[in-house]
Amino acid sequence: MAKTFWEYGQNLMGMMAKIALLLRMSTLILLLVFSVGNAGSQPELPRRRLACVRCCGASERPVVTQRSARMSGDPQYSVPKIRPTIDITILKGEKGEMGERGLPGAVGKAGERGTRGPSGHKGQKGQPGPQGHSCKQQFAAFSVGRRKPQHSSHYFQHVTFDTEFVNLYQHFNMFSGKFFCYVPGVYYFSLNVHTWNFKETYVHLMRNEEAVAVLYAQPSDRSIMQSQSLMLDLQEGDEVWIRMFKRERENAIYGEESDVYIIFNGHLVKPALE
């Protein structure tokens, strides 16, 4: 009897092991069948929640392009591409104030010279100008004298004059003893001096710093009148004056307070612009 229960127990445990094996095999088969059944279809993707957009205007609705639909095999599960259109008039603010002026930029390279443009139309004739002073522009003359005698105490000594006979437009400066050329052209100049007894007379007629003529008399027991004259072509700004030239001997020109023995003259012969 005891053996019978033991055998029965062994048979029952064998049957339970077989049932457990069958259950495991059934579960594996079900898993294989479920996998093969769903292999032909794609799993359902979680749907993307679209962001809220304004629906006040037709221009602000999301746009689903055809290109996004073509990118997916099934249009039902394709994700649409949203391209919202923004109304700029809503975002545009008021015009701001002008800012401060910035610093100037660097100077660029000079460009090539362009072609010459067409000639313009000839302008109208202008109004005539004011009438000029013909005498002031076309004439110049002077005549001056010296009453006092003069000895040459230096190698060169300037001769000045103390008597004015004619000085047209004040072209001769009595203080410096020089004639200043304001009207260019050809001028005539003359110089008259009285020699001194037993003394040499050596005088230069100067143009600027150049000696252009000499008046000379040797020492003698008799005093005489000596003269020199010439014509010069002067430019505006030239100066004409007289100087004494001392050598080994005493050099002097004679004069008296009561009479005029030394005379320097000059006048315009032909203006350059005539």
Image (cartoon, rainbow, N blue to C red):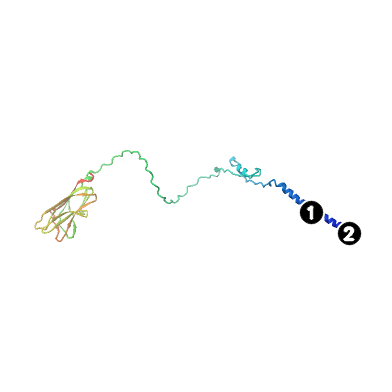
> Which is more toward the observer, 159 or 61?
61
Instruction: Residue 270: give x, y in percent of width and height.
Output: 20, 45
Mark 2 surroundings within 10 Å by alpha-carbon count, few (fewer than 14), some (14 through 19), many (20 or more)? few
Q: Which residue is mark 2?
A: 3
Q: Residue at x 89, y 59 (%)?
A: 3
Instruction: Please give the name of the residue rendered at 87% of the width and 57% of the height, measured from the top-left corner.
Output: 7
Q: Position of residue 120 (x, y in %)?
A: 35, 39
Is residue 166 something that shows in the picture?
Answer: no
The residue lying furthest to the left in this view is 221
Residue sitting nearer the eye, 78 or 181: 78
- In the picture provided, is 144 more to the left or to the right than 62? left
- Can residue 32 be seen? yes
The residue furthest right is: 1
Residue position marked by numbered label 1 in the rendering: 21
Give the x, y percent position of residue 101.
Answer: 45, 49
The quarter of the picture where residue 63 lies is top right
Find residue 164 and report its horizontal and vertical position in percent.
Answer: 17, 51
Secondary structure under tag 2 reads: helix
What amino acid type is highlighted by mark number 2?
A: Lys
Quadrant assignment, res 127: top left
Tell me: residue 60, above or below residue 197. above
Q: The residue under label 1 is which amino acid type? A: Leu
Quarter holding the N terminus is bottom right
Secondary structure type for disc 1: helix
Apparent side of residue 199 relative to residue 72 in the rendered image (left or right) = left
Residue drawn at (74%, 50%) of the image: 32
Judge left or right: residue 129 versus residue 80.
Answer: left
Circle 1 packing at 10 Å, graded few (<14), some (14-19), many (20+), is few
Q: Is residue 81 above or below residue 220?
A: above
